[in-house]
């Protein structure tokens, strides 16, 4: 059928990594109510608790803005991903154009991100390397 895709892989395990104990407890509670099994564990994006080339997919969702070294987190995702694995992400960052960056700044002033969120960093500022 056009427009559809199928895969022969079956997802056997889902692992969520959260370094902050309070947020990890919240994630564990949400995982307990999820329609699929999810194991929530302590860890850091730069030191994922998974073996080399053992993961089919890695997902970053609105977290790269909070990391001190995005390049280290992405390198770690590459380490744990299988050669045919996929990296998926949903992020936000400062716009490339001055006008849009100003609009973002004004919106952030009205609805600030958590203190760890550095959403107004330019893409070139996302790595300590």
Image: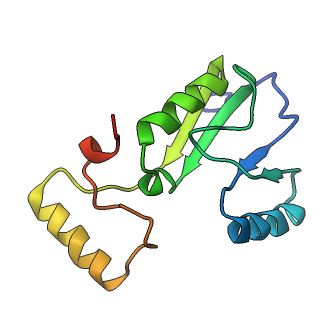
101 sits to left or right of 92: left
Q: Residue 7 versus residue 123: which sits nearer the camera?
A: 123
Snapshot quadrant of residue 78:
top right
Q: Position of residue 22 (x, y in %)?
A: 71, 72
Q: Residue furthest top?
A: 83
Which quadrant is the N terminus positioned in? top right
Q: Is residue 110 above or below residue 116?
A: below
List x then y, in percent, for residue 20. 66, 63
Viewer-side residue, 42 vs 33: 42
Determine the residue positioned at 52% across, 38% down: 73
| Residue 102: image location, x then y, percent | 15, 68
Tell me which residue sits at (28%, 61%) in the image: 120
Tell me the colour scheme of the image.
rainbow
Residue 72 vertical position relative to residue 37 in the rendered view, above or below: above
28 versus 79 height, above or below: below
Q: Quadrant of the C terminus?
A: top left
Q: Is residue 14 visible?
A: yes
Q: Is residue 28 left or right of residue 62?
A: right
Name the spot of residue 89 as percent of width and height, x first: 52, 44
Q: Extreme bottom residue here? A: 110
- The total number of labels drawn is 0
In this image, 91 relative to 79: left or right?
Answer: left
Q: Residue at x 72, y 28 (%)?
A: 55
In depth, the one of 78 and 83 nearer the eye is: 78
| Outermost residue, left side | 98
Observer able to see residue 6: no
């Amino acid at each position: 059928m056009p427009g559809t895709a199928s895969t022969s892989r079956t997802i056997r395990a889902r692992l969520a990594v959260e370094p902050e104990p309070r947020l990890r407890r919240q994630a564990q509670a949400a995982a307990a109510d999820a329609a699929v099994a999810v194991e929530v564990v302590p860890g850091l994006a730069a030191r994922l608790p998974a073996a080399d080339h053992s993961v089919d997919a890695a997902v970053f969702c609105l977290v790269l803005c909070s990391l001190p070294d995005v390049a280290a987190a992405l390198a770690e995702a590459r380490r744990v991903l299988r050669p045919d694995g996929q990296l998926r992400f949903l992020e936000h960052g400062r716009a490339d154009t001055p006008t849009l960056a100003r609009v973002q700044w004004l919106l952030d002033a009205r609805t600030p991100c958590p203190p760890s969120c550095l959403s107004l960093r330019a893409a070139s500022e996302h790595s300590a390397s």
